[in-house]
Image: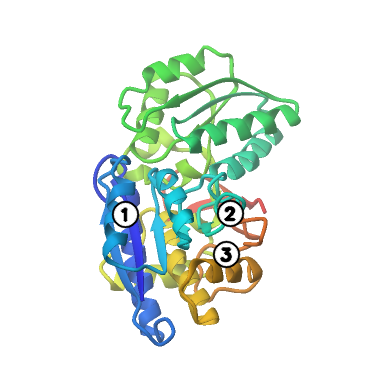
């Protein structure tokens, strides 16, 4: 039985792919050590797109041309280009991406996300910021559909709560100099900035924001919460940013996080860096194995129907939440207890941030 993972293990966003590969490797071993899938060994194939998202689709297609996969996970910015092809082929894709439009069952009937979509988490973040007195928002996001959806969600939520997005900017993932973006946002009169960036671009923006001297309340969405900031910046640069994102990245540890970290450490991976990213990719494999073992099937339509019908069932070992929360109208990872606020700063010994509150 085969499953494929395409991610960015090298290049500008390599921290995401490195975590993805380590988590999937550990989860696959865990599944096989506990009987495999339908009594068969689960085989994981990984493909690195090098953070060049024009290569994601052709690399995925090349792998699929030689092997039949029960699941194809595409866990980076290349997901948007890959999902339409997978849907046409009726191949199940349990992936970690965070784009709400991809997880729409009408257009992605066989696609399920283990990352809480930026647009959804951004709504929670905006409501929290409003409750803290922020009314005029500036937003920075990447120049993908994920970034655009986050900005739209923040704008709608702010306006509904009596606030306003007074400035927004989208930046390319390869941008190093964020000073122009900071200057554009700081001149808007905003009293709070929401950072919806992942990886190196997030680090560059925070660095240039601090250097600018713009003293503004800083918030971050799920992308920032999943970024390994200690590898990019001195802690004083990002200390105090309030992020909303996956609860599994905050302490005290929830669900199966500790067990997952034990498995990742045993298979040679780093269990404490980017715990959110680890959890999402570890969960991909557990959810897949659970569905195959329950249905005795490997085709996309059967597995997708099972995931929709059993979204309230507990998934043993799932580090994200006790259940998936999936249904026929929801393929997003917004299960109860899966989203929380936390304060950026030094990580604890398990790589977790101090939690403020569970949001859902």
The mark that comes first in sequence, 1 or 3, is 1
Residues at marks 3 and 2 touching, judged by CB atoms closer than 8 Å: no
Give the labeled residue for mark 1: 61
Residue 240 appears in view:
no
Number of other residues with Cα within 10 Å of mark 3, as a class: few under 14, some 14 to 19, many 20 or more: many
- Image location (x, y in percent) of residue 68: 34, 68
- Image location (x, y in percent) of residue 77: 39, 43
Number of other residues with Cα within 10 Å of mark 1, as a class: few under 14, some 14 to 19, many 20 or more: few
Label 1 vs label 3, nearer the camera: 1
Residue in front for this viewpoint, 251 or 12: 12
Residue 12 appears in view:
yes
Residues at marks 1 and 3 touching, judged by CB atoms closer than 8 Å: no
Label 2 vs label 1, nearer the camera: 1
Side of 227 where 245 appears, left or right: right
Give the labeled residue for mark 2: 332
**Label 3 residue SS:** loop
Is 204 placed above or below 279 here? above
Q: Quadrant of the image for the N terminus?
A: bottom left
Number of other residues with Cα within 10 Å of mark 2, as a class: few under 14, some 14 to 19, many 20 or more: many
Give the labeled residue for mark 3: 321
Q: CA distance from mark 2 to mark 1?
A: 25 Å
The mark that comes first in sequence, 3 or 2, is 3
């Amino acid at each position: 039985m085969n499953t494929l993972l395409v991610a960015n293990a090298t290049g500008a966003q390599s921290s995401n792919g490195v975590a993805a590969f380590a988590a999937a490797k550990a989860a696959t071993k865990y599944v096989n050590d506990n009987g495999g899938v339908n009594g068969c060994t689960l085989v994981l194939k990984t493909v690195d797109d090098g953070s060049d998202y024009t290569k994601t689709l052709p690399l995925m297609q090349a792998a699929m041309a030689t092997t039949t996969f029960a699941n194809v996970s595409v866990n980076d910015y290349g997901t948007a280009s890959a999902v339409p092809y997978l849907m046409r082929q009726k191949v199940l894709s349990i992936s970690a991406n965070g784009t709400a439009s991809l997880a729409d069952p009408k257009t992605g009937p066989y696609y399920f996300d283990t990352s809480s979509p930026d647009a959804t988490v951004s709504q929670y973040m905006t409501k929290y910021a409003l409750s803290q007195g922020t009314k005029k928002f500036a937003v920075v996001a990447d120049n993908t559909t994920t970034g655009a959806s986050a900005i739209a969600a923040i704008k709608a939520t702010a306006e509904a709560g009596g606030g306003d997005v007074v400035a927004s900017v989208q930046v390319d993932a390869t941008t190093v100099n964020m000073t122009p973006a900071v200057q554009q946002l700081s001149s808007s009169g905003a009293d709070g900035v929401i950072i919806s960036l992942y990886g190196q671009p997030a680090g560059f923006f925070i660095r240039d924001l601090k250097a600018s001297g713009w003293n503004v309340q800083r918030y971050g969405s799920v992308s920032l919460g999943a970024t390994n900031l200690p590898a990019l910046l001195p802690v004083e640069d990002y200390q105090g940013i309030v992020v909303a994102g996956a609860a599994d990245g905050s302490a005290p540890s929830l669900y199966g996080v500790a067990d997952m970290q034990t498995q990742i450490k045993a298979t040679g991976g780093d269990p404490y860096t980017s715990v959110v990213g680890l959890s999402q990719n570890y969960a991909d494999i557990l959810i897949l194995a659970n569905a195959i073992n329950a249905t005795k099937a490997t085709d996309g339509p059967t597995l997708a129907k099972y995931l929709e019908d059993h979204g309230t069932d507990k998934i043993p070992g799932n580090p994200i939440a006790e259940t998936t929360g999936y249904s026929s109208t929801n393929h997003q990872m917004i299960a109860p207890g899966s989203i929380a606020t936390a304060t950026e700063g030094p990580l604890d010994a398990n790589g977790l941030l101090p939690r403020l509150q569970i949001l859902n």
